[in-house]
Image (cartoon, helix red, strand yellow):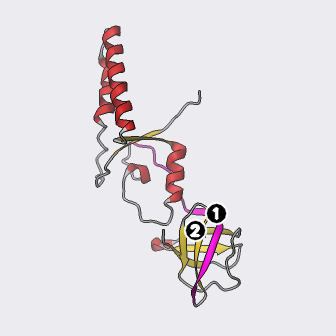
Amino acid sequence: MPTISFLVLIILPITAATSAAAPKASALTALTNCRAIAENEARLACYDAAAAELDTAANKKDILVLDREDVRETRRSLFGFALPRVPLFGARDDNEEKVEDIEEITAKIRGARSLGYGKWQIVLEDGATWSTTEAVARREPKGGSTVVIRRKSMGSYMMKIDGDQGVRAKRDG
């Protein structure tokens, strides 16, 4: 069985994050509190009850458990959006491991439509929609083309289609 070295528990609904560490969900707290019970049978009963509570919370979507790869995929799918400062999206205090920032994505174009004046709305294979905010200089974007989108200063993004000259772009959806 593979070892999971990093888990994130999300308590829904997500509220505004503060600089203080996020509180543990009561179901997780109940599980970790079982470790303090010295007597084996009582500790096992505590773990059984706490595991059932945690399972119920997960089934009701009150708690969401993600491994590191799930976090990476979520962050990648949200590339281009302004994200709230919660631990899932990379905010942390000094005692927590920081999730790496995504500075660039490479994807294939599913489709594109003209917005006029040389500007294009481009849909990537993962469904993300981007629009160029300036005219594409050379050729029109086509399905199957490779696009590289890089984060630039002050919240802007630069898009290169099939290695052509970069144009500014913004995330639509």
Q: Is residue 10 above or below residue 115?
A: above
Q: Is residue 46 visible?
A: yes
- Tell whether position 134 is magenta: no
- Residue pictured at 51% horizontal, 35% vertical: 5
| Left or right, residue 146 beside residue 18 | right
Q: Earlier in the sequence, mark 1 or mark 2?
A: 1
- Residue pictured at 33% horizontal, 29% vertical: 53
**In this rendering, the label closer to the viewer, 1 or 2:** 1
Residue type at tag 1 = Thr
Residue type at tag 2 = Arg
Residue 150: give its label.
Answer: 2
Determine crowd level at label 1: few under 14, some 14-19, many 20+ residues with C-alpha closer than 10 A.
some
Q: Which residues are magenta?
A: 96-116
Q: Residue 62 at what x, y percent from top left?
A: 33, 41
Which secondary structure lies at badge 1? strand
Q: Considering the whole magenta stretch, tell me its main secondary structure.
A: strand
Residue position marked by numbered label 1 in the rendering: 106
Q: Is residue 90 visible?
A: no
Q: Residue 146 at what x, y percent from top left?
A: 69, 68
Q: CA distance from mark 1 to mark 2?
A: 9 Å
